[in-house]
Image (cartoon, coloured by chain):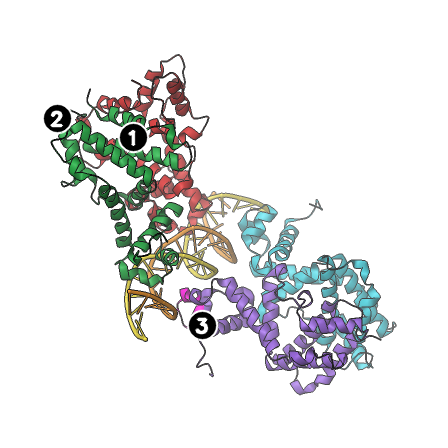
Chain colours: A cyan, B purple, C red, D green, E yellow, F orange
Amino acid sequence: MKKKDMNKQVKIQDAVAAIILAEGPAGVSTTKVAKRVGIAQSNVYLYFKNKQALIDSVYARETNRILSTTDLDRLSDSTIDVTTRIRLYVQQVYDYSLANPDSLTIIQQIKALNGQGMTISAADADPNNIVANLLTAAIDAKVIKQLPVSLHMGVVFSTIHTHTTNISKGRYAQDQYTFDDIFQMIWDAMKQD
Amino acid sequence: MKKKDMNKQVKIQDAVAAIILAEGPAGVSTTKVAKRVGIAQSNVYLYFKNKQALIDSVYARETNRILSTTDLDRLSDSTIDVTTRIRLYVQQVYDYSLANPDSLTIIQQIKALNGQGMTISAADADPNNIVANLLTAAIDAKVIKQLPVSLHMGVVFSTIHTHTTNISKGRYAQDQYTFDDIFQMIWDAMKQD
Amino acid sequence: MKKKDMNKQVKIQDAVAAIILAEGPAGVSTTKVAKRVGIAQSNVYLYFKNKQALIDSVYARETNRILSTTDLDRLSDSTIDVTTRIRLYVQQVYDYSLANPDSLTIIQQIKALNGQGMTISAADADPNNIVANLLTAAIDAKVIKQLPVSLHMGVVFSTIHTHTTNISKGRYAQDQYTFDDIFQMIWDAMKQD
Amino acid sequence: MKKKDMNKQVKIQDAVAAIILAEGPAGVSTTKVAKRVGIAQSNVYLYFKNKQALIDSVYARETNRILSTTDLDRLSDSTIDVTTRIRLYVQQVYDYSLANPDSLTIIQQIKALNGQGMTISAADADPNNIVANLLTAAIDAKVIKQLPVSLHMGVVFSTIHTHTTNISKGRYAQDQYTFDDIFQMIWDAMKQD
DNA sequence: TATGAATGAGTGTTCATTCAT
DNA sequence: AATGAATGAACACTCATTCAT
């Protein structure tokens, strides 16, 4: 009960996220969600067309959260050096992931749930995606390797997710590795030469 | 259809794998599995104690497949240079993953399904694990970065998985990138200096 | 068909009771219960948490029925002679059992179903139990035999149950034996000297 | 493994009895029985036509056990006083029940399982029944009350069963009450005047 | 906006029984 | 005499979804 003004829609999404983290994505049911929120089961359908729409909305919410904590303007500011912008991007994902260690997990879980079918705003498929554009530009400028954008993004996502999951599961302390340690690995993977 | 001598047990596991790939892990039900194999639903329980045991067995089968195509002797042969052995390991995972593009996906899906709890033969937790030992040795020898083994393994797994998934989904042709291209990225991420 | 105002909960309990009488307690299944009531099987779970809760509720209902037709105040009224009160108690059980010949059967069946474990409000285990108190007092006053309360209650229960079952199965007519005939047997068994 | 020569048929019946005592009559399944005996499930059908036949045979076995430890000759020996013979009968049931505290429980459980339908060799329905004859004679001779035989038998059965169950459940020690104590209650219930 | 009642399809699992070997 | 494989029916229970109020 952090926020008082939280509306039901958000509470429902929170419940879904909590269940995904606690029981995996297969554990999500309207029954459990409603129970957690403290509303009638049928009430879920007032806010979401059906279960899929609910889960999609949680997915969208989490991905948008990352974007909203991201300084998109600077990422697309071509007056800034590409390398700097990439580092900035990684830093932002890193900071976000440390602050919200479950967020990436939720995203990944929902992706897994939907099997092959899901491509909701998949990074390099979305032409509007600023990050994809940034990386494509970096590839063209031969700053990073001549490899698919998805590989570059995968390294960023995977490394940070593994790292923050390790921390949140207590496998090691947060201060045992600095951002620079982690970034070094990511950047070495990406950079050309 | 080379499945002639296949016994039911294997057919059932195949059906599970196929469903996981088609619908995600949450789509697996004994009903669907049985229908796919062409047996009565209750028959599944002749071969597997319960659904979890079935899924676990599929998970184990896929992980063992990798191991069985892996030359463990050479990976643990200390007369061979550590760097060479790591390259050998990556090459083996790469070859396997290209030949069995779904295998890593299945493994990842089952992991996701089981939520937080799963650590079945988790790489750096298993003291007997040869790869973990190899990487640990490489870390000690300062050949690869002073980072958790899980980060190193994550880069290998994630990069190869993303790459072979891209290929099997037709996002680009297999010959568009060589093993060396992919290995370069992985090795740059891992190696010290 | 006097069941007009009956709500579903009660209808379901009635169905369970009817099945127990017709097929024994092992014959109770949610499917059969629902079919008898004319609702969907899943509907049973709207009214009862699970099957055990349903059966327990039927048990509780039958035992409460006896209590509610019993004049507890007089049974515990110490201004009344103990012997009189015991006779009153037996009379009440007798009247109830004649009016509801299946009730004791249901109670006994459910007890049997649950195996050894059941002691729900078991007579001489429940300190609040008024009848147990009455009998204990009678034992202390040497009015009835120096034997366990459960033996005294067993004679009452068993004799009346056998008798009313005989009647309801048409083995003999109700007026063939008076209450006094039956009570004589019970009281002879119980009384001291 | 008391007896070495025990044949399977008997072992299977033993398993059924054990399950009834442990889980109640509803817990009996061919699967569990076979597992307990250490044979294949289908093997049960080599010895018993079906499950009902198996359970009936256990019922018959237990009732026959009582009879076989009973000195039927003396019970029907008309040179012996009726009162003496009844006491003898009660004593025999008592001894048997103390030695085999589960036997009466099993009989009662199986009766309950089958619901209304069961009348397998019900005491006073069986014209050959020696005990019924004895009691009928006693009624005619006005030695015991002018009440249905089933009431007389019920008092015997119920009182002894309650008593021995109390003992085997540790509610009190066996030597706390003598046979005479118990018999007194039973005989007072039965005897005329 | 909110609810509770309702339902049919689905879940995993166990069962009694049969049959070829 | 014994088995393992097979099956269809049943089981308790959960689900997503709808609808009248």
Q: Write down the chain letter for disc 1.
A: C
Mark 1 or mark 2, whichever is nearer to me: 2
**Residue A152 versus residue A41: which sits nearer the camera?**
A152
Disc 2 residue type (three-letter): Ala
Q: Which residues are magenta?
A: B34-44
Mark 1 or mark 3, whichever is nearer to me: 1
- Residue A120 in the image: x percent, y percent? 64, 68
> What residue is drawn where x is 65% and y is 65%?
A108
Disc 3 residue type (three-letter): Arg
- Residue D13 in the image: x percent, y percent? 31, 52
Q: Which residue is mark 3?
A: B36
Q: Quadrant of the N terminus of chain A?
A: top right
Q: Dot 3, how many residues are within 10 Å of its Cα: few (below 14), some (14-19), or many (20+)?
A: some
- Residue A191 in the image: x percent, y percent? 81, 77
**Residue C57 versus residue F5: which sits nearer the camera?**
F5
Say above or below: A5 vs A160: above
Q: Which residue is mark 2?
A: D141
Disc ID at residue C97: 1
The quadrant in which residue A178 appears is bottom right
Cα separation, mark 1 vs mark 3, equals 57 Å
Disc ID at residue C189: none
Say above or below: A22 vs A147: above
Find numbered disc 1 in the image and state the secondary structure of the residue it sits on.
helix
Cα separation, mark 1 vs mark 2, equals 31 Å
Say above or below: B162 vs D77: below
Disc tally is 3
Extreme residue toward the bottom, this view: B175
Residue C97 is covered by the magenta coloring: no
Q: Dot 2, how many residues are within 10 Å of its Cα: few (below 14), some (14-19), or many (20+)?
A: few
